[in-house]
Amino acid sequence: MKRRTFLMGTGATLSAAVMGVPVAQAQHRPDELVWADGLPGSLDPHAFSDVPMQGYMINVYDTLYVNQDNPPKLVPWLTTGHTTSDDGLTVTFKLRDGVKFHDGSALTAEDVVWSFHRLLSIKKGPAAAFLAVLDPDNITAPDPATVVFKLKQSYAPLVSATPLVAIVNRRAIEPQIKDNDWGQAWLASNSAGSGAYILDPSTYQPVQQIDMKRNPTHFMGWDHNKSPIEIVRRRDILETTTRVNALIKGDVDCTDSYLPPDQVERVLASKTATVSKDQSMRVMLLRMNNRKAPFDNLNFRRAMSHAFNYKGFIDGVLKGYAVRNAGPIPVNLWGAPSNLAPYDFNLDTAKDYLAKAKAEGAPVEREIEIQIQQHLAQTTQAAQILQQSLRKIGVNLKIVANLWPQLVSSTAKADTTPDMWAHWVSAYFIDPENWIGQMYDSQFHGTWKASCWYKNDKVDALLREARHLDDQAKRQPLYEEASRIIVADAADIWIYNAIELRGISNRLHGFEFTPIGSGADYRTMSLTS
Amino acid sequence: MTRFVLHRLLLTIPALVGLLVLTFIMLRVLPNDPSAALAGENATPEQIAAVRKAYGFDEPLWKQFVIYVEQVGTGDLGNSIISNRPVIRDIAERLPATIELTFVSLLFSACVGIPLGTLAAVWYQSFFDHAMRVVTAAGLAIASFWFAIILQMIFAMELDWLPLRGRFPVGLAPPLHITGLYLVDSLLTLRLDLFGKAFAYILMPAFTLSLAGLASIARFTRAGVLETMQKEFVHYAEAAGYARRRIVWVYVLRNSVVGATTQIGLLFGGLISSAVAVEAIFDWPGVGSYAVNAILTSDYKAVLAVTLVVGLIYSVVNILVDVVHAWLDPRVAEKL
């Protein structure tokens, strides 16, 4: 064969191969959902506790209680309910009958006990919510349907925090344990759950793709959904523009829930998708290190609080897709005072407070530094808005880029914690403890949540009392009072409570938002062709 | 030639050790401790300290480095501190995608760049030559992420000719795994239908990635051909009555592409680093996007492993380029 003939033949064959297949079109099965959102770093639900993990865990695993609806309600799931002793130290859960793991074995109280033992032994992720009050030996199963927790001290948020803990299949994990690792290496790429969807470990690729299929024998049944989704393919598409284009084109059925406002407009203008706008419980704030001068001066902190252009940020940058949050507790959660006046943007007031701070000896001339999260544009935008205002009142703010792990590390000590930094506090469990309790009780100093190093004995007392009371009606005024004091002390700059913006394909139905997991509960969803 | 290859291979060892030391220092000297993030929400300082101890982050830096080098020496690049899986496994799953993308880009760059450069030299100072210079200057200047988005908007969103993102259709089984390179595997298994799909998916990312390389190769080739055409053997060949086409495309080109060939070797490193952005935009499941995630989560073992593997590939490619260089120009081989 002559070379030219060979080349022409090869070219023609390749052309035919490329032209002959309709590659540009999405090729989903009608019952196959492609969910383009962030993925957890590992699949071990006891090792990670972030928002992507919640989205995975609520589908593959079951928990004692779950959160449903918005505002969320705590609903018994694996349990039929619980009782708490009068002293608040013993909490007893009764389990449902007939719950089976994906391998067909029964889920019993022993599995619940073993799951909590594993969690408290690994001491990662969600363990932190329980370590202070629970010893592994004090969780027992007197019979196959009863689990008893004996607490070191009464802890009202215990039941609210149970949705953090996946109940895992001991029989699936134990054979995989190596070097006393509690099966962590194995569970990082496999599953051992009972949830409504089953992981396909053969196609799993960390932070890239997770495939799941429906569990037809899930204990809650499927009567609520006549055409459930059979296959879920979770994909993490790093680039926002690509993610949104993929939604509009029909490649994927949803995006993440933090769409930038300009992309929201694009999705809304398309004929193939829409945007679900749901008020969440995710508070954005600028931290101030209350231990470092000049932030150790109340008037300086108040000056800073009046120097941020809240309306400009929410209406201008976020196009109104956020709700002003006056204090640390999300405005849509009990415990947030209904009449709490937020700091307003007023540079004249800020100047007055600055003058008072200066008169009190605060070094207001020194350059202060705010650290932003490099890959989260909103943190940069918020810092720039503050920088612009501060320049007008003579305060020099330097913006420094950093990454989350480094920022978290730096908050272990007051002197390494930045002057200021920007972040959000998301909903991990639905209780004021998740926000105000862990952010402003001084016993949490050294954690990133308490990184403003605020210390007020009255607030400590209120938060500790609220933590140990079982009655929400009695806890609520304590949190409200603590909120007022903290806001008056201008411990931080609270900006907004998020409205989550998730692009959703028009063929997707049954999306029900709840702040935990950001609505990624596939049980309720279905697709039209 | 064997001695030359062995010599070049030996030289890669100190280069890789140097790379490892530099990367380790850059990652670990910075205030970069992932313990707090690993310990999870609300972890107390005591829990964070326990995690630090468990992962050996409390050891002196030199000791951490010695332990790591000992591990690497036994072929163990360690487990990702985030995914808890062997990093070599994660990289092995993704590397074929990056290699395929990079080689197809190189192929584009060479197959289009060399003829373009040759024609520009042959038609020196013509409209084509001027146009080529403008286009290649633009090719070097255009940001790949911008160009990628423009391609996506035209060919995927407007015309609907090519897929927007990914490496293969979601839900469709890729070709039987032989090399991990979908184009090669589909041909080896005689699955032209799968080849067509894989080819369509790689077109836009590979073209985006090839743009700067294409421009660079075209310019090097043009300069090389212009220089060679002044040589005496070309005048002799013309006087002897050889066809112009034969003189240019066989004799002149072979003597001119030595510089461009060296450029291809250098380009490879650039393409791998540019692949990070291109992979992110096209959602291409390669080591670039893996490295981005590893950096964002301070997964230093994953970052070190990616650096080491990419450095190794870069070294091997450059050895291959040297071999090709010696083949094209026998005088180089004679000097060895």
Image (cartoon, coloured by chain):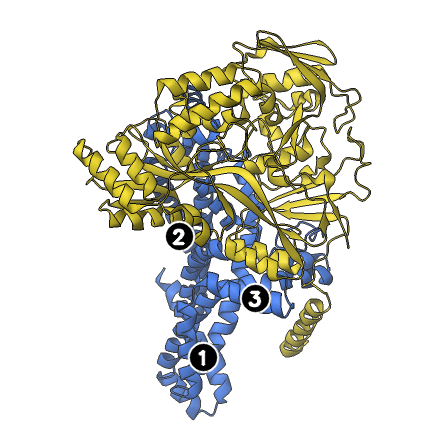
Chain colours: A yellow, B blue
Badge count: 3
Specify few, some or many for label 3: CA neighbours under 10 Å numbering under 14, 14-19, or 20 or more: some
Residue on which disc 2 sits: B8
Q: CA distance from mark 2 to mark 1?
A: 31 Å
Alpha-carbon span between mark 2 and mark 3: 45 Å
Q: Which residue is more in the foreground, B328 or A411?
A: A411
Foreground: disc 3 or disc 1: 3
**Closer mark to the observer between disc 2 and disc 1:** 1
A294 relative position to B214: left or right: left
Give the labeled residue for mark 1. B118
Q: Horizontal and vertical percent for residue A358?
A: 19, 36
Identity of the amino acid at label 3?
A: Met
Q: Is the C-beta separation of discs 3 and 1 under 8 Å?
A: no
The chain letter for the residue carrying disc 3 is: B
Secondary structure found at label 2: helix
Label 2 is found on which chain of the structure?
B
Give coordinates of residue A145: x percent, y percent. 74, 14
- Which amino acid type is shown beneath numbered disc 1? Thr
Residue at the front extreme of this rendering:
A339
Sequence-first tag of 2 and 3: 2
Q: Is residue A198 visible?
A: yes
* Residue depicted at 49% across the width and 68% down the height: B109
Task: Please indicate whether residue A475 sits to the left or right of residue B15 in the image.
Answer: right
Q: Determine which residue is flagged by label 3.
A: B153
Dot 3 or dot 1: first in sequence order is: 1
| Secondary structure under the numbered disc 1 in the rendered image | helix
Instruction: Check disc 1: other Cα within 10 Å, few if <14, some if 14-19, many if 20+.
Output: many
- Chain label for disc 1: B
**Element at badge 3?**
helix
The quarter of the picture where residue A372 lies is top left
Q: Residue at x 58, y 10 (%)?
A: A88
